[in-house]
Image (cartoon, grey):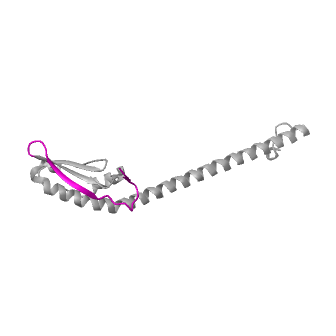
Amino acid sequence: MRVASEPSQPIVILDRQSEVGTVGRTVLKFTLNAAPASDWVQLFHDAVGTKSGSFNFIHSDPEVSGNTIIWSVPVEDVQAAVEYVEEALPRANGKYPDLLGQQQENQLDEAEQARYRKEADEAGMAERSLDEAEQARYRKEADEAGVGERFPDEA
């Protein structure tokens, strides 16, 4: 089973089945061309605004597992559930490339910030080392001159 990770590979429905569920319910199964990434799944769940139908339908959500969407819905809401999935899929596909781009941009920003921090830390260490070397030189000169622990600005 392929996992969709490229924005060029939209998730599409290959097959749709319905089975009789518990009393008054139908289980809808949508087979997808690939198992979507978890970020795509979140976009799928957020893609369609409010649902209309029975209370049980409105307060239920489809489950994405591997390359399958499974949803147990009241019999009277089967058509609304099918429409929901068929509407949410292209919306999630449309938003997914933007999300990937934003994530990539954030990763680059974080990498750049880490590089700047590392450079600043290294520069700080070099500066401290120079300061320490300079102080050691002044101490040595002061000891040789018999002055003690004075630095040039203390003389």
- The residue shown at (18%, 52%) is 17
- Horizontal arrangement in the rendering, residue 127 relative to residue 117 (left or right): right
Residue 25 seen in render: yes
Q: Is residue 147 left or right of residue 36?
A: right
Foreground residue among 119 and 56 = 56
Q: Position of residue 46 (x, y in %)?
A: 28, 55
Q: Which picture quadrant has residue 78?
A: bottom left
Indicate whether 142 appears above or below 93.
Answer: above
> Would residue 90 appear left or right of 102 to someone viewing this image?
left
Residue 144 in the image: x percent, y percent? Answer: 90, 38
Q: Position of residue 52 (x, y in %)?
A: 14, 56
Q: How many numbered marks have been drawn onto this rendered protein structure? A: 0
Task: Return the residue found at the far right.
Answer: 145
Task: Tell me the magenta residue range.
Answer: 1-24
Magenta segment includes 30: no
**Up-down relation of residue 104 to residue 19 (above or below):** below
Looking at the picture, tell me which residue is in the foreground, 16 or 80: 16
Q: Is residue 52 visible?
A: no
Between 109 and 65, the residue placed more toward the observer is 65
- Residue at the (68%, 45%) spot, across then down: 125
In the picture, the quarter occupied by the C terminus is top right
Task: Indicate yes or no whether the magenta region holds residue 23.
Answer: yes
Q: Nearer the viewer, residue 92 or 154?
A: 92
**Side (left or right) of 145 relative to 124:** right
